[in-house]
Image (cartoon, rainbow, N blue to C red):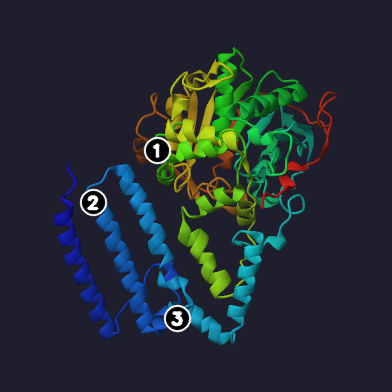
Amino acid sequence: MNSPRFPDSLAQLQGEFMSGWQDLLAQAQSGSLPVPKDRRFSSSAWQAHPNFLFLAHAHLLATQTMQRMIEAADLPEDQRERLKFSAMQWLDAVAPSNYLATNPDVQQTLLETKGMSLLQGMTNFLEDMQKGRMSQTDESRFEVGVNLAVTPGQVVYENTLFQLIQYAPQTAQVYKTPLLMVPPCINKYYILDLQPDNSFVQYAVEQGFTVFMISWRNPQPNDTDGIDKATWADYLQHGVLQAIDVVRDISGEDKINALGFCVGGTLLASALAVARARGENPVNSLSLLTTFLDFSDTGILDIFVDDAHVAYRELQLAQGGLMSARELASTFSFLRPNELVWNYVVSNYLKGQSPPAFDLLYWNADGTNLPGPFFAWYLRHTYLENSLVQPGKVTVDGTPVDLGKVDMPVYLYGSREDHIVPWRSAYASAKWLPNTQRFVLGASGHIAGVVNPPARQKRSYWTADLPQKPGDPQQWFDQAKENPGSWWPDWSDWLASHSGVRKRATKRMGNARHRPVEAAPGRYVRLRAV
C-alpha cells in the first residue's frame, strides 16, 4: 500500500491539531483539564497550577502531532527513522518539565526548601561536571569487590586482553562439565555478578556449576603495550578461544559449556565458528543471552549507522586509538532520553535531590573504552553489512566464519522490551544455529530482563517449543506460555542436562600451569574509564 500523499495528510493533521487545541482551551477555561498520564507531569503541583497544566497538555499535543507528521511523510524508511529519532531528542529536550520557569513541581520544591534545593542542585551539577558524567545513582554506596562482584573466586589466568576468574564451589558436588561466561567487552562483567541476592554467577555456582568468567581489560589512553590496536580477530583468538583452552586445561575436560551475553555472545559464537572451521569442537553447549548474530533488524541503533558514519569511524579509529566509554555511554543514554537523561536533570539539578543507590545504574556508569580497530571492524561487519550470517564473508586469519557450523545444543534468551537487541533479533539466531533447542523470552529490557533472580519473584517469561525451521517470531510468541517469575531455573535445568554427572567438588583453584594470580574480582574490573 502506498503512503498517503503528504500534503493531504498534512491538511488532515492540521485540522486535527486545531481541533485538539480548541478542546484543550475549552477544558482549561472550564477547569476540567485532567492530569496527564505522562509521569513527567503527574505530580500534584501540575494539577494545582492550571496554566502549567495547560502547557503540559500543549506539549503532549504538539509531540503527538509531530510524530504523526513524520509517519505520514513520504520518506524512505531509514530516513523516517532518523527523523523520528531527531524529533524525539528535540521534543524531549524542550518539555516544560525540564526547566525551572515552567515546572511547578520544581518551583514548589524551591519555595519549600527556601532556595536550598537550587543550591544543592548547582552543587550536584558542578560535581557531575568534574566527573564528566551525569550521576544516576549514589556512587558512594558501591565498590567493586566490596559489595559488588563479591562471589568468591580467584583469577587463574591473565593476558593483555582479559583476566579469567574461576569461582569457588559452594556445593559438595559439582557438575563435571564447567561453564565459561563471556560478557560484553563494551561493559564490565559484573552485571552478571552484582550483589549476592541478584548475582547470576552466584546463582549458577549454587546450582552446582563450576563457573569461569572472562573479565575484559579496560584500555586506557596512557597504555603503551599496543592494546589500542587490538582487533576483532585478537578478541576471538587471544580472548575467547584462549579462555576456552584455559578452562579445558584446568578442568581436564575436552569440552566445556559456554555462555555469552550481548556482544560477548556475538564474540563467542564467532569464535566457535572459527574453531569448527579448524576442525575443533571445544564446546558442549552454548547459551546466548540478548545476543545479535543476525543484524538485519537492530532497532533504534540502526539510525546511527550508515556508510558515511562507518567510513568516518574507520578513518578515525581503524589504525589505532580508543572509542571512549563516555561517548558510548552518552549514545546509549540518549536512546531513552526521558528516563536516562532528563529525569536526572530535573531531580538532580533542578530539585537538588541525590539519586538513590541502585547497583545496576552504578554498573551502567562504570563503562569501558574499546580498542579503535575492534570497534571499527564491529561497526562495519555487523551493523552495516550484517556479515556474520553470510557464510565465509568474514575470515579470521584466513579462517572463514560460518555460523551454520556451530552445531552444539543452543539455548537462546531475549528480553521482550529490549531496545538494544530487539527480541525478534535474539530469536533470529535460531535460524543460523542449526541445533537451537530452546528459546525463552523474558519480560522487561536488555539488563533488567536478564538480571531477574528467582527469590524476588518478579516479572515473567514465555516458553514454547521451537518449530523445526524457526521463522516468524510472532508465531512463536502467539502460542507461547507465560510463566511467572525468573527464567533462571529454566536455563539451569537445561544446562544441567548438558553438564554430565556430578562429582566431588574441590576447593583448589587453577592448576599447576595456571596458578591463582589474585582474588576475584581482580585488577582489570576495578579500573574505571571515566
| Kind of residue at disc 3 | Ala
Name the residue tied to disc 3.
45
Q: Residue at x 40, y 39 (%)?
A: 480
Q: Is residue 462 above or below residue 391?
A: below
Task: Name the outermost residue toward the left.
Answer: 8
Task: Name the outermost residue toward the front.
Answer: 315
Secondary structure category for the residue under label 2:
loop
Q: Can the viewer see residue 306 in this picture? A: no
Q: Nearer the viewer, residue 221 or 247?
A: 221
Mark 1 / mark 3, whichever is N-terminal: 3
| Location of residue 468 in the rendering, given as x and y in whole percent from the top left corner | 40, 24
Question: Which picture quadrant has residue 61?
Answer: bottom left
| Location of residue 246 in the rendering, given as x and y in whole percent from the top left corner | 73, 25
| Kind of residue at disc 2 | Ala
Label 3 Cα crowd, 10 Å radius (few <14 / some 14-19 / many 20+): some
Name the residue tied to disc 1.
297
Label 1 Cα crowd, 10 Å radius (few <14 / some 14-19 / many 20+): some
Contact (Cβ within 8 Å) of mark 1 with mark 2: no
Task: Name the outermost residue toward the top.
Answer: 279
Q: CA distance from mark 2 to mark 3?
A: 38 Å
Would residue 161 appear left or right of 307 to someone viewing this image? right
| Location of residue 72 in the rendering, given as x and y in whole percent from the top left corner | 23, 52
Label 2 Cα crowd, 10 Å radius (few <14 / some 14-19 / many 20+): some
Q: Residue at x 78, y 42 (%)?
A: 520
Q: Using the image, tell me which numbered label, if any, was put on residue 73.
A: 2
